Image (cartoon, coloured by chain):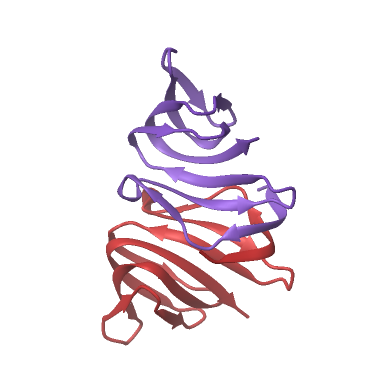
Chain colours: A purple, B red
Amino acid sequence: MSQFTNVAITKEANIYFDGNVTSRSVHFADGTKKTLGIMLPGDYEFNTGAKELMEILSGDLEIQLVGEEWRKISAGESFEVPANSSFKLKIYKITDYCCSFLG
Amino acid sequence: MSQFTNVAITKEANIYFDGNVTSRSVHFADGTKKTLGIMLPGDYEFNTGAKELMEILSGDLEIQLVGEEWRKISAGESFEVPANSSFKLKIYKITDYCCSFLG
């Protein structure tokens, strides 16, 4: 188990898709933010503001970025999503993730 | 939105009941721990080690402590569970909670 230390965490959850996707926001001393989240099996689409780095801690899923093919992502793998874009997800098994918002 | 500041958070989620209950562990400088979690609708039973203070941030549920009647808990309310005991939950609406482990 790894930890983020010296951070602030927002108490209230972020809740999407009737609770099938939820996350907590973690705030770092340098002003950056990450979310730690859970996605239950299902199909989802998210929009990005800032560029995002999605790190899959556990789970089984496929993702599709705009203009790209679907591709499989496994635990321990990451993918980036451009700013002001969107991405689609097919979650096959409960997925634990860390999303970093890149400046 | 309120925050816990100057804390550490375990990156990996705690996952129970096939992901219908998930939480993240938050570690405080004084050595105490809380979990921030989500419970989806369903019936659950949990055992306690340490005494727990369960604060309901949002949601709609009923709880039953050992030897007590079922009672309704609403957002903003809390309940305590004795150490080395158990409690049952009927979650009617997605529930966001903060659980403090009391020494």
- Name which quarter of the figure residue A67 lies in: top left
Q: Is residue B86 left or right of residue B60?
A: right
Residue A83's spot in the image, x, y percent? 54, 28
Q: Is residue A100 above or below residue B23?
A: above
Residue A64 in the image: above or below residue B75: above
Q: Quadrant of residue A6?
A: bottom right
Residue at position x 32%, y 70% from top? B89
Tell me where residue B12 appears, x and y as whole percent: 58, 47
Q: Residue at x 61, y 62 (%)?
A: B26
Q: Nearer the viewer, residue A3 or B76?
A: B76
Q: Is residue A84 above or below residue A69?
A: below
Quarter of the picture holding the C terminus of chain A: top right
Residue B25 picture quarter: bottom right
Going by the image, does B64 lie left or right of A39? left
Of residue B76 and residue B36, the one placed in the foreground of this image is: B76
Seen at 53% across and 50% down, the residue is: B13
Q: Nearer the viewer, residue A72 or B49?
A: A72
Query: Among all residues in the image, which is located at the extreme bottom?
Result: B68
Provide residue B75's location: percent of width, then percent of height.
Answer: 36, 73
Q: Horizontal and vertical percent for residue A61?
A: 43, 28
Q: Residue at x 62, y 66 (%)?
A: B4
Question: Would residue A81 be found to the left or right of residue B74 on screen?
Answer: right
